[in-house]
Amino acid sequence: MISVQNHRPQLSGNKWLLILVIALVAACSPKTRPVGKGTTKPTDKTTGTTDKAEKDKKEDKDAKKVSDKRVSTVAMILPFGLDHLNPGATYSAAGLKKASLSLDYYRGFKLALDSLTGEGANYRLQLFDSKDEPSQSHSLALNPQVKGSDLIVGPVFPDGMKVFTTVPGNNKKLILSPLSPSAPTTYNAENLVTIIPPLEYHALRAAEFAVAKAKTKKVFVLTSGYSAELPYIKYFKKAVDSLSKKKVKVVQLTVARGNLSPIMAQLTKFDRNFMVIPSTNQSFLKVTLYSLDTLAKRYPVTLIGHPNWEKFSFLKSDQMQRLNAYITSADRVNYKAQSTITFVRNYRRLYRAEPSEYAIKAFDEGMFFGQLLADDGDKIKNLDDKEFTGLHNSFDFIYKKGQGWVNKHVNLLHYENFELKQVE
C-alpha cells in the first residue's frame, strides 16, 4: 500500500494538484497475494475422483510461500509541498515545478516496484512530503516510520539532505540521494548513496580519455577565469597527474575575448591537440569556440567539454563535429532501445503522460534497489557486488570512507554525424 504521510489538506481550485493528491492517496502497489483457487478439473472417468484436493494442497503451499515472503519497506521523501493546497495558499512557479518533479519520480519508482511485485517481490512504499523545508526534513529524520524503513529515498535537494543526515542516530539504514550530483563530502554520511555521479567522476572520465589519447603529452585547459570552474579543473588535474604519473602536462590558460595566441607556440600540426573547456557560460563559450574553430583549420583539435553541454541548444553540431568534440554524461537515454520503448509504452498506458527524466531515473533506481531488497535485505549494504545497466545510466558503486556509496559510472559521448553518440 502506498501511504501518504501528511494530513489531507482542504482542496483548493488547483485541479492539477487535486488530481495529484487523489492519485497518491488512492494508489496501491499490486502485491503478491495468496494464489486463489482455480477451476476444478473434469472428473476422471475411470476412478470418478478429481484432482481438486491435490490442487488445493499445492495452492495452500504456494500461498504459504507468498505469505512468508518478507516485506521490504521503502520511505520516500519528496518535495510535494501539499500545504500549498490549503485555502488561500497557492503554488509558486518554483513550487509547482518541485511538485511535478516529485510526482514524476514517484510514478517512475512505483512502476519499477510494481514490475518487481509481479515477479513475486513484496514492498511497502511510504510517501512523505518534505515541503523542501530543512525543518521538515529534520522532523522526518526523527520519524520512527522513516527510521525503521529498509531504504530511505530522499530528501531530494542538498539543503534538506544535509539536515536529514546530520540527525544523530540516523545512520543505520541506507539513504539514497536520488537526483542530486552534489559531492558526498557535503554531507559526511557513511550510509549515503549518491547515485548521480558527482562532477569529480566526470573529470576523471575526461582525464582517462585524454591521458590515453594525447600523444603530445599535453592537455590544454581553457578557462574563463570564473571560480565556478575551479572544482572541475582541480579534479581533472589531479586525475591526469595520477593516471599518467605526471607524464602528461596540464597547461591552463585563461582566455580573454577568444584570444588563444598564448598557447600557439605549444601546438602541433602532426597530432591532435587536446583542449578541455570546463565553462558553462554561454557568452564565453560562443566566443571561445569560434576562435577554437578558426584555430582548428591549422591545428588538429580534440575538444572535451563540460557535462552540462549536453543540455545546451546554442551549441552548433557542425562546429562541435569540426572540433572533434567529446563530453561526459550520466543521463544518456537511448530512446531507440527496446527496453526504453517498453518503459515509455507502459508509463504512458498507466499514467496517461510522457515520462520525464526524473521518472526514468526513478525507474532505474527502483529496479536496482527493489531487486536488492527482494533478493536479500543484507545485499543492500554491499552495493559494489553488483553492476546494473539502466535506461539513463549504469550503476557501478565505490565505497569511500566518510562519503558512503558513490556511483562512479560516467559515459563518454562524441559528436558524430551531427549528433551525440556514446563511445563504447
Image: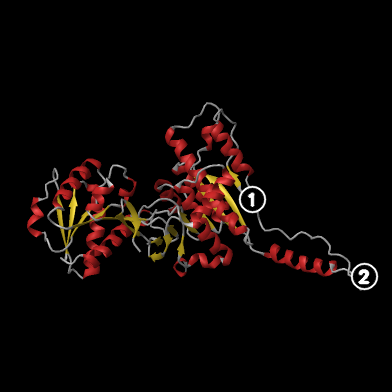
Q: Does any portion of residue 348 appear in the rendered image?
A: yes
First of labels 1, 2 by sequence position: 1
Judge left or right: residue 197 versus residue 277.
right
Residue 1 disc label: 1
Q: What's the residue type where badge 2 is placed?
A: Gly
Q: What's the residue type where badge 1 is placed?
A: Met
Residue that label 2 marks: 48
Decide which of 302, 275 is in the foreground and name it.
302
The spot of residue 340 in percent (x, y) is 49, 54
Judge left or right: residue 13 versus residue 231.
right
Snapshot quadrant of residue 387: bottom left
How many numbered marks, from 0 up?
Answer: 2
Q: Secondary structure at mark 1?
A: loop
Does 286 appear above or below 274? above
The spot of residue 162 in percent (x, y) is 41, 50
Give the Cα separation between the discs numbered 1 and 2.
45 Å
